Image (cartoon, rainbow, N blue to C red):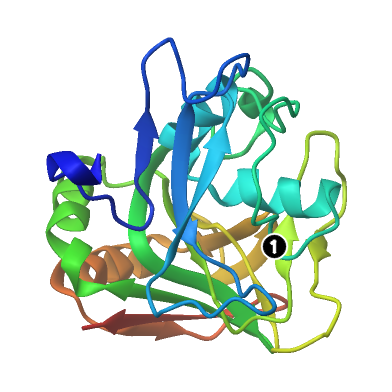
Amino acid sequence: MAQEGDQVELGELTQFSEAGLFAGSPHRSLAYLPAPPLPGIPLSSGTLLALLLSEDEFEVAKAFGTYRITTRLGRRQSHYPHPPWSERQRASVVSPLLMQASVLNPVSRLILRGALIGHEGNTLQLRISRQVLSALKTQLEQLKPDEPLALLGDPRPDAAGRLVWEEGQKEPAAIVPPEGHGSGLAGGFVLCLPGRPADLGRLVEDGYALELQEASWQQLRSALSLGNAWVFAAQGRGLNFSLEWMD
């Protein structure tokens, strides 16, 4: 690919021909992730990890992003935040069929490359790069006024752990590094739910739900379209919310 002048960026996916990458391996797709630190191996800033994906994982990554895949790999292989290696014959950790049980399945979704999601203390934080402002504005213009929207992004890199979810799981769960650094938790999405009686954020699956009164939803939509900061204090028990932008 590089010899042909093709370059890949963080968050992108590549699917190869039926022949795949490795003889005898059913996996023929790659996801490009931030390379985690490796003991004894110096890595320059911006180094990417190419993670081998199954066919089911590739389809899920296109629709829901890679966060759900990497955290499940991290949990199952006991390596935070996810293993830096690929296994040619490993079983898939997700499938499009099982994703039908997710709260994300029936709603419109937008993958915001470079957006950072997580909570610290009692505040849910969504930080979005201005580079995706145009795509975000276009998506919002296509939504009905009361239509829910899931914003999918990346986990806060400074978090002390990452939310993880699998089908049938009833309570929130997280994976954490053995050394226990950072603070707060990170997630993979913010699900905006308009028309609710009170404004509040809460944990759901491996991300967050943002329940919004109608007026608050319109204010948030405007902030997302114009690239403005926006905050609210939760009414009752729940997470506060902060929208910030990165240049």
Nearer to us in this view, 103 or 83: 83
* In the image, residue 122 above or below residue 50: below
Q: Indicate the amino acid at tag 1.
A: Leu
The quadrant of the picture occupied by the N terminus is: top left
Q: Residue at x 38, y 67 (%)?
A: 115
**Residue 189 in picture, x, y percent from top left:** 52, 56
Where residue 206 sits, quadrant-wise, is bottom right
The residue that appears at 59% across and 71% down in the rendered structure is 200
Determine whether, in the image, residue 17 is placed left or right of residue 30: left
Say which quadrant the C terminus sits in. Answer: bottom left
Tell me where residue 116 appears, x and y as whole percent.
45, 71
Quadrant housing residue 211:
bottom right
Residue nearest the viewer, comparing 220 with 67: 67
Picture mark count: 1
147 displayed left or right of 208: left
Q: Is residue 157 above or below residue 54?
A: below
Q: How far from the left and from the top, in percent, is residue 220?
A: 32, 69
Q: Residues within 10 Å of mark 1 (few under 14, many from 20)?
A: some
State the residue position of label 1. 203
Q: Check the image and report above or below for 132 versus 108.
A: below
Q: Say if 63 sits above or below 219 in the image.
A: above
167 on left or right of 55: right
SS label for mark 1: strand
Residue at image location 54% in from the left, 20% down from the top: 55
Residue 149 visible to the viewer: yes
Residue nearer the viewer, 215 or 97: 97
Residue 198 falls in which quadrant of the image? Answer: bottom right
The percent coordinates of residue 225 (x first, y second) are 17, 65
Asked whether the viewer can see residue 192, the reply is no
